[in-house]
Image (cartoon, rainbow, N blue to C red):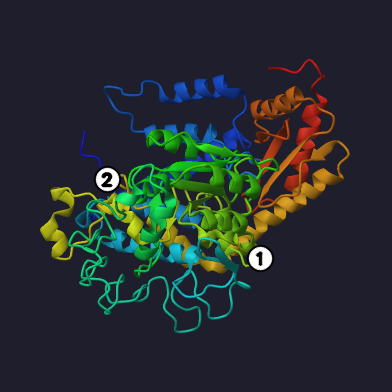
Amino acid sequence: MSTPPLASGPEGPRALRPLLDTVLEALDSGARARGGPLPAGGPETVAARVREAVGEALPDQGDPHALRTLVHAFAEGAADPAHPLCAAHLHCPPLAIATAADLAASALNPSLDSWDQAPAASELEVLVAGALAREIYGDGETRPGSLETGGPGEHHLRGESRLPGGHGLFGESRLPGGHGLFGESRLPGEDGLCGEDGLCGEDGLCGEHGLCGEDGLCGEDGLCGGHRLSGESHLAGASRQAAEPHRAAARDLPGAPDSLITTGGTESNQLALLLAREVYGGSVRLVCGANAHHSLARAAWLLGLPEPAVVPAPAGTLDPTALDETLTRLPGPLLVAATAGTTDAGLIDPLPEIAARCAAHGARLHIDAAYGGGLLFSTRHRAALTGLDAADTVTLDLHKLGWQPIAAGLLAVKDPRDLTALRQRADYLNAADDTEAGLPDLLGRSLRTTRRPDVLKLAVTLKTLGRDGLGALVDQVCARAREFAALVHDHPGFALHAPPVISTVLFRPAGATDATVAAVRRALLTDGRAVLGRTRLDGRLWLKATLLNPATGPDDLAALLHLVAARRATLVEGHTPR
């Protein structure tokens, strides 16, 4: 057998072209064989088809037709998020432009753990991560449409967002001739981190003024301890009142917001808890709503943190009054996690009120905006995220309201000094003399070592569509959700839970038991006709339509509701299949 061709190198494109034709043909034939949003027959039927297609997973002799055979089986057995009746989860149909960019990332296979494995990708990550952080936090100037928190008990709302010439996603200015995403320095100073005022030194973190020492973390004036960004007053059990002056002094130093590219909300939330733990010197207690994503409690367990304090969310969102009582009662240090776009219903916690409570009690704030963060791109819907920039950290997923192939997550960080907790030294990747000679140090950008360049598809999408193009997609899916909710509301055979906040609609057949609701959903899955989610709110089970497909039209919405009504009619109450 001859040596299989490689994807890159001089012969890479020539080798890939016929293989891509095979893949595209198999995707098409598999989708036609499936015939709907999901393969019919249920788990056993699908598993049998896959086993038949695969045969022996590791044969002695290879099969030259394996690519066509397995891609066909993969597509035939897939849940296709681009089908208008596939609407169960926060599982978006990826844009063709992003998918094409992802092919280039796979072909060249850079690894973002050292500069010599990813020279262009490492710089692209800095540019895109900075641009998206500025989209949340601004660029250090007073930013319209945000909540500014100046300290305990001090906060105010700013006015309307997005004036012409305002600062935005693609750089320092939106006026003609302004700097863009791939333009000049995104921060003061030639090195992109610190200016020439002597506040910061050559490493972009600490300067010659004595506030910080040679390790870029702690100095000789007693503001910081010997091993962390924050000193001994932040050790577990220390009072947050004692900790706050030290943190406030540290935050007087210049530094622009940044973000880290992650695999999604789970990793971003875990990183947020880790950074909070390290800022406070070794321990912090999570305070979150009953509506919070399960990954937060799991991260607290994984990091060895105390049991989270769960605050009631009686209407599906965190109750600020109950939060205030909890923060008053518990000793610090505390990390409050709010949600902008709950998984169950797409609800947004009252962010300005929560930020005010955190400021008054000296608690750190993390906002999980994995779902709702995409509203930032929409002029129409951005105001729903007022208060987002008050958070110390923000989770964002662009494989939800960003139409990216998985994975495409981010963690935005208001104070980049918090990221010093991630610094590691491995001589084969970031030797000290290499770093001093100017080679970028990438190990502090993630908990992972090997990292694929997910940034490429993000950069291509942002540059191709711009904020207006992404905002239009957000507006479309939110509009479809409102239209579907109106259909449900006007149909005598259905009950609507509430008008949608983002693009999630909860509904159920009127008068049905929970067992019937569950049976209707499972029957549609087995039929392969429609994919709906489920959630439990207000003590009842609801069907969930999560509309993330901008190509879905009014006829598709009507067809979805008709399918649910027809399937319910075939089920006899009290004799529903399990």
Name the outermost residue toward the top: 575
Residue 147 locus on image (x, y percent): 57, 65
Residue 229 locus on image (x, y percent): 30, 55
Vertical position of residue 459 compared to residue 411: above or below: below
Numbered label attached to residue 380 = 1
Residue 199 locus on image (x, y percent): 27, 73
Looking at the picture, which amino acid does disc 1 mark?
Arg
Which residue is at the front of the view, 535 or 22? 535
Left or right? Give the position of 159 relative to 95. right
Which residue is at the front of the view, 571 or 388? 388
Looking at the picture, which amino acid does disc 2 mark?
Thr
Please give the residue where the numbered disc 2 appears in the rendered image: 449
Q: Is residue 559 visible?
A: yes
Residue at 56% x, 62% y is 376
Residue at 22% x, 66% y is 203
Q: Secondary structure at mark 2?
A: loop
Left or right? Give the position of 280 relative to 288. left
Distance of label 2 from label 1 (alpha carbons): 39 Å
Quarter of the figure that contains the C terminus: top right
